[in-house]
Image (cartoon, rainbow, N blue to C red):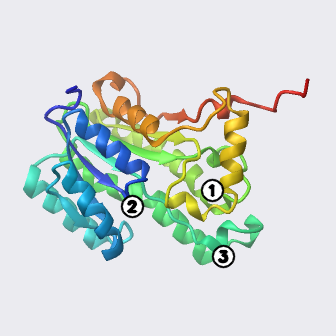
């Protein structure tokens, strides 16, 4: 399949082979897209580099999304290497584990700032550097990942829910800003999936069980299902879609209350 033949994509946020971002990278690669990767720190590099090389990637660079000089350096290097950018995948989020326990009002000031900066502002600043490389590219787009905890209270999600709400709002503002240039900005709200990032949520096992029992499809979703939706949003099949938060959660978000016992 060549939906993305001749396109290239920078993937920010792969942590290991169970990352949603890695599944997206694989799906884009299968569709003919050239993919590049960033990582943060030596430990993550050891996991990301073999994955990137397995899909023929020659762009594997260190970048801390909270470090402006590293961001600028990576995008300058991308420009030198490729000249343009078609797709930016933003799959970055962080919150201190201590701020995912207990009451939300006990969130520390430092923890709140870190969650917002890493999970929300990173999309804004990466977009700033990506857009000049997207000028004139038909179908250029930016995609990020969110979760239902941005819309409703999810026990144990705490400050990350607030950050994801900010992220979804940022998607709408960025989509409005970039619409006239033809660059689309969207988000996928994925159901709970076991990843390195989700391991910090204290009720993850119970959350997975609850979603599987309550969702209309009576199951959880897979990384592959999220990745296939990402392929759609990154392709010309979604040419009229921007500013959207598309749920891939087996329909969980449409359910109000569980069915009464028979």
Residue 234 x/y as whole percent: 32, 34
Q: Is residue 145 left or right of residue 143?
A: right
The correct choice, above or below, for 252 with respect to 84 in the image is above
Residue 122 x/y as whole percent: 41, 60
Q: Is residue 187 left or right of residue 192?
A: left
Q: Residues within 10 Å of mark 3 (few under 14, many from 20)?
A: some
Q: Mark 1 or mark 3, which has the lower sequence index?
A: 3
Splitting the image into 4 quarters, where does residue 256 fall? top right
Please name which of the two marks, 3 or 2, marks the residue nearer to the observer: 2
Q: CA distance from mark 1 to mark 3?
A: 14 Å
Nearer to us in this view, 141 or 103: 103
Check disc 3 and report the residue beneath it: 108
Q: Secondary structure at mark 1?
A: helix
The correct choice, above or below, for 249 with respect to 51 in the image is above
Check disc 2 and report the residue beneath it: 15
Check disc 1 and report the residue beneath it: 162
Residue drawn where x is 26% and y is 71% of the image = 70
Q: Is residue 25 left or right of residue 228?
A: left
Q: Secondary structure at mark 2?
A: loop
Residue drawn where x is 69% and y is 49% of the image = 207
Splitting the image into 4 quarters, where does residue 180 fall? top left
Residue 179 x/y as whole percent: 35, 34
Residue drawn where x is 26% and y is 37% of the image = 140
Nearer to us in this view, 180 or 249: 249
The correct choice, above or below, for 158 with respect to 222 in the image is below
Q: Are marks 1 and 3 in contact (CB under 8 Å)?
A: no
Q: CA distance from mark 2 to mark 1?
A: 23 Å
Q: Secondary structure at mark 3?
A: loop
Residue 220 x/y as whole percent: 59, 38
Nearer to us in this view, 151 or 261: 261
Q: Mark 3 or mark 2, which has the lower sequence index?
A: 2
Q: Are marks 3 and 2 in contact (CB under 8 Å)?
A: no
């Amino acid at each position: 399949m060549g939906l993305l033949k001749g396109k290239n994509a920078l993937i920010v946020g792969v942590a290991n082979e169970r990352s949603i971002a890695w599944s997206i990278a694989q799906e884009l690669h299968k569709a003919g897209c050239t993919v590049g990767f960033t990582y943060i720190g030596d430990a993550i590099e050891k996991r990301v580099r073999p994955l990137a090389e397995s899909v023929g990637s020659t762009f594997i660079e260190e970048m801390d999304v909270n470090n402006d000089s590293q961001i600028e350096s990576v995008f300058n290097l991308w420009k030198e290497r490729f000249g343009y950018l078609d797709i930016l995948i933003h799959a970055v989020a962080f919150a201190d584990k201590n701020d995912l326990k207990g009451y939300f009002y006990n969130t520390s000031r430092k923890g709140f700032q870190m969650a917002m900066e890493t999970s929300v502002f990173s999309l804004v600043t990466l977009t700033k550097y990506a857009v000049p490389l997207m000028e004139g590219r038909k179908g250029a787009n930016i995609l990020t990942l969110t979760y239902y905890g941005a819309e409703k209270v999810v026990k144990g999600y705490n400050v990350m829910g607030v950050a994801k709400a900010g992220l979804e709002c940022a998607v709408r503002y960025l989509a409005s800003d970039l619409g006239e240039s033809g660059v689309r900005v969207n988000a996928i709200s994925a159901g709970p999936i076991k990843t390195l990032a989700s391991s910090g949520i204290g009720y993850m096992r119970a959350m997975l069980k609850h979603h599987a029992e309550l969702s209309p499809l009576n199951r959880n979703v897979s990384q592959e299902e999220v990745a296939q939706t990402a392929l759609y949003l990154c392709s010309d099949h979604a040419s009229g879609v921007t500013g959207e938060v598309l749920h891939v959660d087996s329909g969980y978000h449409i359910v109000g209350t569980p069915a009464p016992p028979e």
